[in-house]
Image (cartoon, rainbow, N blue to C red):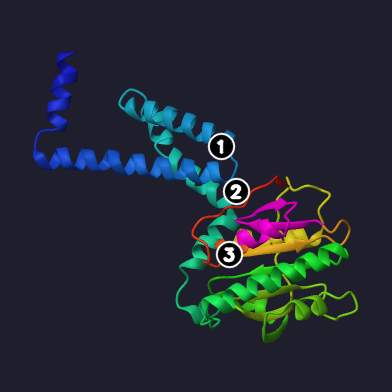
Amino acid sequence: MQSFINNLKEYFATPLDTCLIILDMVILAVVTYLMCAFLRKNNAARLIKLFAAATIVGVCFYSLRDKMPVTGYIMSFVVLIVIFAYFTMFPHELKRGLWKIASPRESAGIYTAKYDCSYEELQQSVTEIVKAVQNMSKRNVGALIVIATDDLPMHIIESGTRLDAYVSCQLLESIFNTKAPLHDGAVYIRGDKIIAAGCFLPLTQKIDVDKDIGTRHRAAIGVTEEYDHLAIIVSEETGIISVARGGEIERYYDSEMLTDVLEQNCGLRATLSTSGKRRKK
């Protein structure tokens, strides 16, 4: 006990040493919290337990490095190994984060769309989108609409046909008409403008996606994994309306729920009041 107290006195010998130790503990706590929160957000409960166990074991062995130098030295690299695992297992999430801070914009391949519409024009755009989606759902017309509130990836915009047209129910329905040349691609909307149509989106590489969903749904998940966008999907087999955000998809939206999520996404509503039954796939 006396030796333990003496060790503590050595650690806290000066005010500077005390501040550095406290700062060290705070940094470790923050990093641990952020890693666990990231894993929890990506449905990785097992990895959270593995990370916690590896950290505890690593700390224990590192504390015994004087008596077990080889093992202690190896276990001191546990955190680096875990970080490397993040880059391996969550490439899309990391890519999305890096894309947001990419600079300069030209070298990052970003298209800056004008977003200067009024509140009323934005509200009208939401109304037109909901009306078009409902009409296509009733007729089992497949559709994929991406709503962006920030800058757009140039390579996706250039993969389609630039329109820069005002959002309207009639235009959206005509684009996704099965006889139209652009109906197989995605429509990109920002504000009250349809920026492009017939765009090709990256498909998700997730293996736990429901096998019943089609290519449009996988593309919606893929683009929302990489970019901070919202995607609306209409199934051409069932007419079911789905919404993808953050790499997750929710199905069985009705007009009220769709209006709520669009208004919240566009900043027309402070909090999301969507209610009803939805099932993640």
Mark 2 residue crowding within 10 angstroms, few (<14) / some (14–19) / many (20+):
few
- Say which residue appears at 38% left-offset and 35% top-offset: 73
Q: In the rendering, at what x and y percent does residue 65 appear?
A: 33, 28
Distance of label 3 from label 2 (alpha carbons): 33 Å
Residue on which the image places disc 1 = 47
Residue on which the image places disc 2 = 89
Q: Nearer the viewer, residue 264 or 79?
A: 264
Amino acid residing under circle 1: Leu
Q: Is residue 258 magenta?
A: yes
Mark 3 residue crowding within 10 angstroms, few (<14) / some (14–19) / many (20+):
some
The local secondary structure at tag 1 comes to helix
Label 3 vs label 1, nearer the camera: 3
Please report the bounds of the magenta region as a residue range. 240-261
Left or right, 224 with respect to 184, comes to left
Q: Are marks 2 and 1 in contact (CB under 8 Å)?
A: yes
Q: In the rendering, at what x and y percent does residue 166 appear?
A: 66, 84
